[in-house]
Image: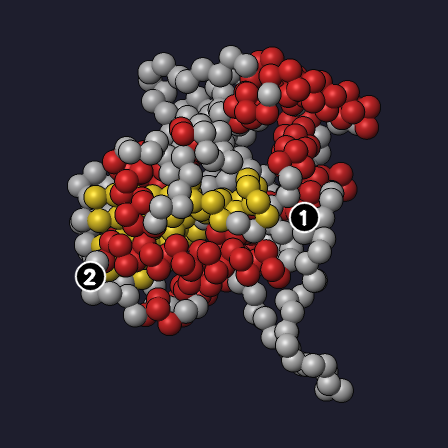
Amino acid sequence: MASVVPSWPRRLATTVEPTDVEPTTNPYAPSPFSPDYTAARRRFRDAAAAAGARLTQYKHPAPGPDGGGLATDVAWVGPEGAAAVVVLVSGTHGVEGYCGSAAQIDWLARAEAAELPEDAAVLLIHALNPHGFAWDRRVNEDNVDLNRNWVDFEGRLPRNPHYADIAAALCPAQWTDASRKATTRELHDYRTQRGLLAFQHAVSAGQYEFPDGLFYGGDRPSWSRRTLAAIAAQHLGRAARVAFIDYHTGLGPAGFGTRIVAGRPGAPEYLRAAAWWGAGLDSPKAGDSPSADVKGDWLSSAGDLAPQAETGGIVLEFGTVPILAVLEALRASNWLHAHGQPLSGQGDAIRAAMRAAFDVDHDVWRGMVLGQSLIAVRQAVAAVAG
């Protein structure tokens, strides 16, 4: 996979000249980024306990790749029943949880976690999709994309007829050099004929007809959807103002945190987000976002999680590698779990490629993530507590 930012130094630059004394520790350690889900969960819980948070866990029914248990962990910092609440959610898209987990751990380690304004709290939801996080997948245990799952399954489901045109090419039954070359050419031809935006919409807007395909929305509310609703019912029932930040990676310029709002410009949810986080927002509905205009994302339904409150929210989306490299990693992961052997040498290689596509192992990228996250959290706290 091509380097994201080959001109960056491997370690952050410093103005200090080298000496004959070897440093005994990394000056940037300990990093809040974790090597795997198990470590991320342990570090999150430790950081939450150290910050005096009240911890709750929601056990997931399926095991991780090591056979161990999985859970969504919840930490509450601040007074119970606070009127102003900021909600930080990591791991909606599984493997993207490395970024969100690190941002949550970083915030918990800061003094401001103990210095919140009066009657304000922060609710941290770690690994909303623990199965995807643990297996380095974007989807859940049922191949469901959680941000296509918040739809009314008793009504008419959203349609994406163009997905069928490329379904077989996106998710071939064989994953060989020959099949990859042939299907990549087919996808390239479709993209050339229809245009990049039409291709992106066909691929990623969401679909409900191909359970083994990409961006599948499911046929019922997922475990994670039900869990998020339970968390909100337990913690947000007395809130008057709630700000949501949902952490994601994989779209946009490397290291840049795009602030995406579900509503179109001028809509109440867009105007509230602009008032809380500033004017630099992107809206998929306006066509100015790196994301397609998807159906069934949970942030569009965030108001239902706290119906008595004034709510607003953003997706904080950090770019990683070029979009076609992200798509290739997703295709490989999809094939692996539909047709291959996840616990194999090939499975390990595909998981590593997924990790590289959604979590850049570079100090500069990671520093950009933490800095931009901290700004967004501070803005949210000031907005709801002001």
**Residue 192 can be seen in this image:** yes
Q: Is residue 337 left or right of residue 217?
A: right
Give the quadrant of residue 192: top right
Q: Which mark is residue 4?
A: 1
x and y, in percent, of residue 274 in the image: 31, 45
User: Of callouts 2 and 1, which one flags the residue occurring earlier in the amino acid sequence?
Assistant: 1
Give the quadrant of residue 191: top right
- The answer to which of 358 and 18 lies nearer the viewer is 18
Q: Which residue, as the protein is rendered here, is positioned at the far bottom? A: 20
The CA span between labels 2 and 1 is 43 Å
Please name the amino acid that badge 2 sits on: Asp
Residue at point 20%, 61% (across, down): 119
Q: Is residue 340 left or right of residue 375?
A: right
Q: According to the image, what is the colour scheme of the structure?
A: secondary structure
x and y, in percent, of residue 2 in the image: 73, 44
- State whether residue 103 is above or below residue 192: below
Q: Which mark is residue 119?
A: 2
Q: Is residue 236 left or right of residue 136?
A: left
> What crowding class fits label 1: few (fewer than 14 Cα within 10 Å), some (14-19), or many (20 or more)?
some
Secondary structure beneath label 1: loop
- The answer to which of 298 and 261 lies nearer the viewer is 261
